[in-house]
Amino acid sequence: MLRGPAGLRAAALDRCHVRAELTGVVERDTELELGVAGALPDLGDLIAAGLEVHEVPVPEDVPTGLEADAPILVAPDLLVRPPWVPPLQGFAGIELVVPRGMAFGSGEHASTQAALRAMHAVWDDPASLADVGTGSGILALYAQRRGCPFVVACDVEEAAVRAARELLPGTVVVLGGPGDVPGPVAAVVANLSGAELHEVLADLLRLWDRRSFLILSGMRAGEEAGVRARLPGEPCRREAVGGFVALAYPPAAPSGR
Ligand SMILES: C[S@@+](CC[C@H](N)C(=O)[O-])C[C@H]1O[C@@H](n2cnc3c(N)ncnc32)[C@H](O)[C@@H]1O
């Protein structure tokens, strides 16, 4: 049970989503009841700031509803799993461990999988990358895992920004849209709805310096033509998963002399 100011409870919940095996959450007006398998993460700074933590042990065999969770194989050498699912035995590819928290982007949604597949297919070691609409931070995490030296992320939802900051310590996560992100950057990835993509497309194109790829995901197949019509050239890769499409645009060709 967590009691204290709402901001401290929210920060503790975000940390538990990322750093603990959460089995349940009940939010009340002035307190938060969490089910946690195993230990709580270090909440020392929040306790010092006024958070009260009351721990009550429960029997180990109480069903949590999470027993059926399994790793999600996005590509033969790329998987996503929540922290409470054990690693897949013998798997030698890239593993992204992402909690199923308050922000979109656990790896279950088709638009996330399409975006990840497109990133995985066209990855060319960009010097910098912006993840627009980062949600949980899953696409930025992929870039970090591939060794991208400068990753920046943004989201208009505070809960997403908090979750991404927990998942990606040390990464700049901006509360705002692509126009608020420091740039330009070599690669841009945005998993947004078709309407949201249209709204921010000019800002995405300003942010992208075309040294590496641009990936737009989250549009429905019926929205694809409208998005394509506003972009320079043709995509070099198209991934479709469960009715959602991701388009990857290549870097600008080097100017020949
Ligand atoms: C479909 S989710 C994608 C989350 C994650 N990137 C993924 O691929 O699973 C879209 C996210 O974009 C955010 N969003 C919507 N419009 C936005 C905008 N104009 N600028 C930045 N973020 C935005 C939403 O709050 C949401 O977290």
Image: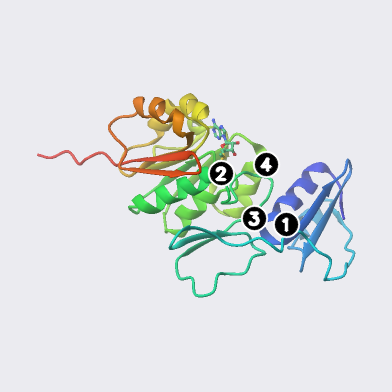
Q: Residues within 10 Å of mark 3 (few under 14, many from 20)?
A: many
Which residue is tagged 4? 159
Which residue is tagged 2? 173
| Residue pictured at 45% horizontal, 71% vertical | 92
> Quick check: which quadrant has ligand 1?
top right
| Residue pictured at 43% horizontal, 51% vertical | 117
* Nearer the camera: disc 1 or disc 3: 3
Q: Residues within 10 Å of mark 1 (few under 14, many from 20)?
A: many
Depth check, front residue: 189 or 2 = 189
How far apart in space, not on screen, are marks 1 and 2 (Cα)?
Answer: 19 Å
* Nearer the camera: disc 1 or disc 2: 1
Query: Which numbered circle lies on residue 99?
Result: 3
Which residue is tagged 1? 16
Depth check, front residue: 52 or 88 = 88
- What amino acid is found at the position of numbered circle 3 in the picture? Pro
Mark 4 vs 2, N-terminal side: 4
Query: How far from the left and from the top, in percent, is residue 211?
Result: 30, 43
Mark 1 vs 2, N-terminal side: 1
Q: Tell me if the residue at label 3 has its CB under 8 Å from ligand 1.
A: no
Query: How far from the left and from the top, in percent, is residue 189?
Result: 44, 42
Image quadrant for the N terminus? bottom right
